[in-house]
Amino acid sequence: MKKKAVIILVGLLMIGLTGCTTKQNEKITVVLDWVPNTNHTGLYAAQELGYFEEEGLDVEIIQPSEGGSADLIAAGQGEFGVSYQEQVTYARTAANPLPIKAIAAIIQHNTSGFASPADRNIVSPKDFEGKKYGGWGSPMEVATLKGLMEGAKADFSKLEIVDVGAMDYFTAVKDHVDFTWIFYGWDGVSAELKNEPINFIKLQDVDKNLDYYTPVIIANEDYLAKNPETAEKFLRAVTKGYQYAIENPEAAADLILVDNPEIDRELAVASQKYLAGEYQSDAEKWGIMSLDIWENYGKWMYDQGLLENQLNADEAFTNEYLPQ
């Protein structure tokens, strides 16, 4: 009887010790800006390679069902999100500002611009005259087109703007318009693979104010204030994920395909190889942002009449949660 009691006591002690040492990983939701693509590879790499788990985080990556990622993060529907500098700027300068802040730049320089089939002979904003542009109906698009055309002494009234929604570049320029706005790392690389010659006008090459951060990782300011250590853990894992993607682009492309098998592998690998040189580019480390980029683009947006109020750039972003 005494021996049985000792066995039971030892068993209870072992259960108690197990309960003391087992700790549940902290649940985190990341809201993407769009369908999964190679802009997001570092997030998926951190997930698949166990970097989040090493930091004690249980991360779920989701696509927004409705509303933008900024709205969802501001409403507490996720801890972290993927957004854009322009979206953060709009959100923070609105009549009812949203409490979101950028905490890392996924890509160091703006890789987007205007693309057209080479036979349309569009090589500068001056050539937009008499052409059809296919966009998604944003005032920022109109302001960008107008600003670039005026800078090239072109007549903006001679450009026809057509709303093509989420139509892809190849479909749009085949039957509907002459040029669209693309991210080179996806549609530009895809054009290379398809052997379809394009002319590409990179925004950062025609106006330095348009070399803004797109995309960025965002968080709710209140969440950051209450959970600074979690933010540091999250970015430590994500930084490792993007560094892995920089050093191992083909293997990293395969990691994003684990949860997203519908993505074409050839395109994913080619896109990843292009972005491997763009994620960090000439910055001292991945993710870091500079005040002048935020100030320049914020001022440009305000001067174009896109903002109700001027942006306080100091409060729109922070580098403090990035690994030191």
Image: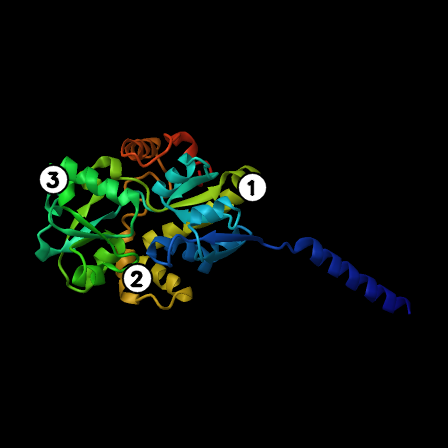
Mark drawn on residue 268: 2
| Label 2 vs 3, first from the N-terminus | 3
- Relative image position of residue 238 (x, y in whole percent): 43, 49
Residue at the far right in the pictured view: 1
Residue occupied by mark 1: 227
- Relative image position of residue 202 (x, y in whole percent): 20, 45
- Residue type, mark 2 in image: Ala
Residue occupied by mark 3: 154
Rendered image quadrant of residue 15: bottom right
Q: Nearer the viewer, mark 3 or mark 1?
A: 3
Query: Residue shown at 70%/53% (left/top)?
Result: 20
Report the Cα–Cα distance between label 2 and label 3.
Answer: 37 Å
Report the Cα–Cα distance between label 3 and label 1.
Answer: 50 Å
- Residue type, mark 1 in image: Asn
Rendered image quadrant of residue 110: top left
What is the crowding at mark 3: few (fewer than 14 residues within 10 Å), some, or many (at least 20)? Answer: some
